[in-house]
Image (cartoon, helix red, strand yellow):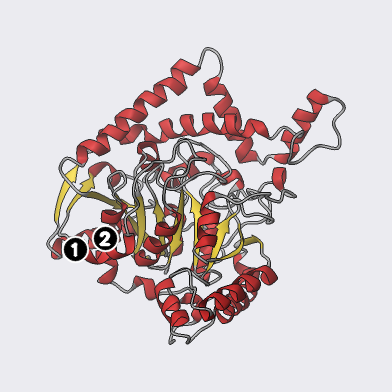
């Protein structure tokens, strides 16, 4: 293979494994060696177990030798954001609160990937409890962007995006509550897919905001993202919000769905605050679709101006409720300084949670409190309905929407100390979560400073097959997927 093993897509590696030109152990050894070489600068991992990963790879080779391969993902190393449960591995959410916690069970997505033969490889850094847009809120360390390690990889799934871009995994999983897969994917130059809410089980995912969270893949190519989605999607009785519907063969559908499509350009997403270089790159992507025969028209999502406010009311309210379980008694950090039971609650939470998590718990508790519930939380839920309806109205005219993923490229670590400035990094992604829609970020160029740029495609509910096909059509005409950071 002309490209290093650790930069190869799943499709190429799987073909090499099936053709006996490569073993899963050799692939895992290459990924481990690459991780050792670049991890001191990238710092994408919270923990990893080389011996366990090599044992999984050896088991994959044994299956293939016996003629019982489990499919395209058998032997492929996949990294996990440290909010997704894997039996016997740390599950920290990058927080002091869970610094010593080891998961006693597998998440549903973990079980599905194990059944597909994937090698579960490492625990990837993130913003604490998935709250942030830069991975600077991790209680353990800040992850660097592989294209420039003095810059952030995005967040909250920054470790997942950075590990993939750096060649420390072949694919990774993240979670997306307001853009936490798509934004770091754009900043790190990889593909990031946020599925429709309910398509992928949330069982075994540490909850941030339960009505917004969704697990999804990071991958080198759209086809790789389709392969991973195929493995993790589907109904799960253990998740009450899981949608019960047949899962199509996303990979085979890529070749069948060739367009042309009707694409909508939301005028509210090309306004003040968008980097001119990013705007120009996205315009080039739009022009490419037009050249392929796609009809492009401007549409309006009039309630976009309320997305940020609505999101930070609903998300923080749900976070306040979800994180109440970390009380210093049942599991997690317990203060050694507490004088009595009440003090134990206060001290344990004060010591265990970081500043951003505390900020969101306080805000969420406030909007849920007596006298404010109707004014804030209930009203936000009503506005959320209007935001979703905007998207559904647009889909009466178009098949998908195309927008920037992030308004700005990767910024310097420590550059954004103002929380509001950080929140604005998700301005183009949070509406998708409020509406429960699928969306994908696809690389579409670089800034003059050689920082990656991505554009976002937003699809109709449970129409991932079509969304992936639209993204694949762009990717096939460009070579961004073959660009790697020099590290």
Which mark is on residue 175? Answer: none
Question: What residue is pinned by disc 1?
Answer: 258
Label 1 element class? loop
Let me know if residue 485 appears in the view: yes
Where residue 271 appears, as percent x and y from the top left, is: 29, 45
Closer-to-camera residue (271/319): 319
Image quarter of the N terminus:
bottom left
Closer-to-camera residue (244/374): 244
Callout 2–callout 1 Cβ contact below 8 Å: yes
Question: What residue is pinned by disc 2?
Answer: 469
Image quarter of the C terminus:
bottom right
**Residue 307 sits above or below residue 45 on the image:** above
Q: Quadrant of residue 344?
A: top right
Residue in the picture at 21% in, 36% down: 393
Where residue 11 appears, as percent x and y from the top left, is: 40, 73
Q: Tally the numbered discs.
A: 2
Where residue 423 appears, as percent x and y from the top left, is: 47, 42
**Residue 71 sits above or below residue 338 on the image:** below
Residue in the picture at 39% in, 62% down: 225
Question: In the orientation shown, which residue stands out farthest toward the top?
Answer: 371
Q: Residues within 10 Å of mark 1 (few under 14, many from 20)?
A: few
Let me know if residue 409 appears in the view: no
Q: Spatial distance from mark 2 to mark 1, Cα to Cα?
A: 7 Å
In this picture, residue 59 sits left or right of residue 455: right
Where residue 51 appears, as percent x and y from the top left, is: 69, 71
Label 2 element class? helix
Q: Quadrant of residue 440?
A: bottom left
Q: Quadrant of residue 302?
A: top left
Closer-to-camera residue (99/353): 99
> Which one is earlier in the sequence, the residue at label 2 or at label 1?
1
Residue in the picture at 33% in, 29% down: 385
In this picture, residue 218 sits left or right of residue 281: right
């Amino acid at each position: 293979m002309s490209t290093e093993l650790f930069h190869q897509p799943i499709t190429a590696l799987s073909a090499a494994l099936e053709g006996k030109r490569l073993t899963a152990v050799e692939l895992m050894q290459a990924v481990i060696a690459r991780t050792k070489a670049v991890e001191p600068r990238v710092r994408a991992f919270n923990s990893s177990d080389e011996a366990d990963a090599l044992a999984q790879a050896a088991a994959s080779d044994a299956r293939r030798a016996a003629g019982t391969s489990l499919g395209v993902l058998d032997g492929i190393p996949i990294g996990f954001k440290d909010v997704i449960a894997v039996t016997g591995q740390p599950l920290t959410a990058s927080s002091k609160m869970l610094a010593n916690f080891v998961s006693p069970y597998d998440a549903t997505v973990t079980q599905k990937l194990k059944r597909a033969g994937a090698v579960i490889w490492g625990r990837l850094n993130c913003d604490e409890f998935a709250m942030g847009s830069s991975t600077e809120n991790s209680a353990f360390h800040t992850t660097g962007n592989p294209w420039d390690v003095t810059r952030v990889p995005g967040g909250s799934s920054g470790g997942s995006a950075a590990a993939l871009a750096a060649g420390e995994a072949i694919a990774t999983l993240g979670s997306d509550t307001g853009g936490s897969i798509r934004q770091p994917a754009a900043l790190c130059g990889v593909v990031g897919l946020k599925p429709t809410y309910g398509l992928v089980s949330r069982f075994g995912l540490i909850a941030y905001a339960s009505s917004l969270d969704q697990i999804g893949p990071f991958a080198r190519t759209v086809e790789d993202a389709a392969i991973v989605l195929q493995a993790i999607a589907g109904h799960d009785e253990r998740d009450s919000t899981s949608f019960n519907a047949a899962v199509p063969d996303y990979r085979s559908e890529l070749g069948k769905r060739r367009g042309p499509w009707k694409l909508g350009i939301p005028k509210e997403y090309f306004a003040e605050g968008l980097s001119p270089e990013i705007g120009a790159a996205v315009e080039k992507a739009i022009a490419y679709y037009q050249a392929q025969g796609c009809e492009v028209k401007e549409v309006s999502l009039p309630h976009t101006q309320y997305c940020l406010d609505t999101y930070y009311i609903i998300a923080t309210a749900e976070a306040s409720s979800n994180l109440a379980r970390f009380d210093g008694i049942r599991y997690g950090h317990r203060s050694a300084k507490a004088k009595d039971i009440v003090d134990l609650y206060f001290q344990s939470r004060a010591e265990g949670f970081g500043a951003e998590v505390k900020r969101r718990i306080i805000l969420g508790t406030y909007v849920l409190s007596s006298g404010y519930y109707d004014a804030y939380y209930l009203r936000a839920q009503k506005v959320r309905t209007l935001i979703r309806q905007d998207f559904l109205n647009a889909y009466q005219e178009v098949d998908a929407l195309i927008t920037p993923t992030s308004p700005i490229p990767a910024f310097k670590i420590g550059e954004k100390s103002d929380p509001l400035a950080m929140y604005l990094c998700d301005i183009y992604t949070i509406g998708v979560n409020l509406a429960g829609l699928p969306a994908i970020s696809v690389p579409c160029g670089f800034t003059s400073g050689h920082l990656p740029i991505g554009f976002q495609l937003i699809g109709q509910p449970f129409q991932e097959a079509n969304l992936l096909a639209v993204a694949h059509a762009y990717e096939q005409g460009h070579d961004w997927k073959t660009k790697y950071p020099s590290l």
